[in-house]
Image (cartoon, grey):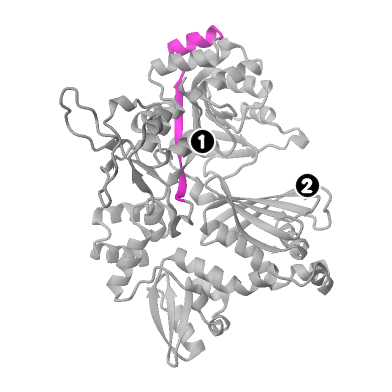
Amino acid sequence: MEERFIGEILVRQGALSPERLEQAMAVVAERGARLHDVLTTNNILDENAYVEAMARDLGLSVIHKIAVDEIPTSLLDLVPINFARQHKLVPLSITDDAIRVAVANPLDLSPLDDLRALSGKRCEALVASADVIDAAINRVYERKDENALAESDSDNDVEELQDLIDMTDEAPVIRWVNNLFYEAVRDRASDIHIEPSDNEVTVRYRIDGDLYPVKTAHKGFLPSIVARVKIEANLNIAEKRLPQDGRITKKIKGKLVDVRVSTIPTARGERIVLRLLDKEHALVDLPGLGFDREKLSIMEDLISRPNGIILVTGPTGAGKTTTLYACLNKINSPDLNIMTVEDPVEYELRGISQMHVQPKIGLTFAAGLRSFLRQDPDVIMVGEIRDHETAEIAIHASLTGHLVFSTLHTNDAAGAIARLVEMGVQPFLIASSLLAVLAQRLVRRLCTECRQPYIPSDQDLRSLELDPTSFGPPRPLVAGQQPPPDYIDDANTVVRAQPTALATGEKRPRPVFYKPAGCEHCAGTGYRGRIGIYELLVVDEPVRREILNNSDSKSITRIAAERGMVTLRVDGTRTVLSGRTSVEEVLAMTQAGDLG
């Protein structure tokens, strides 16, 4: 009932149309999710628009930024951190008769009643987004712990206080480690690196593919930090000489997050890398991957075939597994038996049987794939084809009526064919079983809050294989002038605003490119999130003949390009033209050779 009431408020305030509300409520009923999460996750409604609509309807003020340093310490003693996190609120200030409190859900009055009973003062509520409140809670409550861990008089002071187990149980260390997870999820980090150096412990987050230093601790606290992580991951805290792997499951900001833990010994102490796997965020649908209309149509046709092999290629961290999961989610239905063998199983998919390989006991990709064929599968996903045996079993599975998905580590789509030949697979088997190869990269998406438009130079155009002579001369972008708008349809196809017709001999105006600037919204990086660029090689008859002739990858790429294949560099150029990424990102992620 509360979700429906919130929806009616949003409609009443003009933030949401009745039609979009009904669509969102259908998803709420199906998934059992909160309306807020459905609206913001699917980009139906901006977080700020949601907060402002709720506050306006209830006659409350909105706060977009909380000055953490101005919150008095006495308030922190009055409001426990668990209470603040559970009810998504943070105290701001206190007077003789009132406490000002920022809340994420102004409809939940019970925590305000509890706070009034605890303090004996009335509560003045202001509305802030959940992200703003989470960030404030983390910083204000962890301030003392962070200072304590960052400072020490000598290397021996910390370790002489207590033994290792007692140190690990100390609240400051536990809160400091927990805060790493909270801030990593808030900042959209995929990995947390805890690295010892000579005098300190450095923590870095990998965000959108790049590593950023975020905090440090005194070197003396390394044993207790490592022990705390090992205890949570059920690892042996006494073993410091060998690498260890483990797993932690945490609920952070209402989301279930799987954390893969890896520890290794180094000359300066144990080093830890934590890989964060957000179960909810990973399940992206196929249109949400950023395909243009043509590629999306082709992919939907390919994954509906009854048999054959579809390969996804790219370097580590290019989003290959996410693409395969999106394909499986698209075709997942009760009438299909879908099975996967992965290393490891990163996300659990409902209705799909997933197996985790364990090479130590002989359960390899090839062994798992061979056993699958006795389970009457319709669709099989193999996490990666690494050797001749796995490749051959996958090909024979496709030839006997199964649809097979898998990945390879190659630079481009045509390179996957050469890689299979190197593994010892006969070209005629590849030609008869392979349906398509999708090469992909992830480029950082420009922050829409601070990206800066500019007119590209001739060199910028040439670097993206655009002919400068087909455009007018460079011109300065007048201050305050808005660049031509980009129109993006439902299939993510970008249509730039251009004159309807050009006079004879007239050149097209130069496109508007964007570059990163940096703001609070993107943590000063100029980028927020990543988007895929793709090269889809469909194995049709001309390409099949090249495979049978054992042609090299360049020849196959050239034939495919003549048949309409868009290379990685060209797809990256389209993304630059749409204003979603920068020239530098595309050049860094693609090669000139990608042009075929």
Q: Amino acid at mark 2?
A: Pro
Which residue is the site of mark 2? 243
* Label 2 – label 1 distance at C-alpha: 33 Å
Q: Position of residue 372 (x, y in %)?
A: 62, 29
Quadrant of the rendered image containing residue 577 = top left
User: Residue under circle 1?
Assistant: 588
Residue 272 appears at what percent x and percent y?
A: 71, 52
- The verdict on residue 254 being magenta is no
Q: In the shown orientation, is residue 350 left or right of residue 19?
A: right
**Callout 1, which amino acid?**
Ala
Q: Vertical placement of 186 versus 384: above or below?
A: below
Magenta segment:
526-550
Q: Disc count in the image?
A: 2
Left or right: 260 as drawn, with respect to 238:
left
Q: Is residue 81 above or below residue 465?
A: below
Vertically, is 319 above or below 244?
above
Kindly state the secondary structure of the residue where label 2 is placed. Answer: loop
Give me the residue at 28% from left, 64% from top: 8
- The answer to whether residue 329 shows anywhere in this view is no
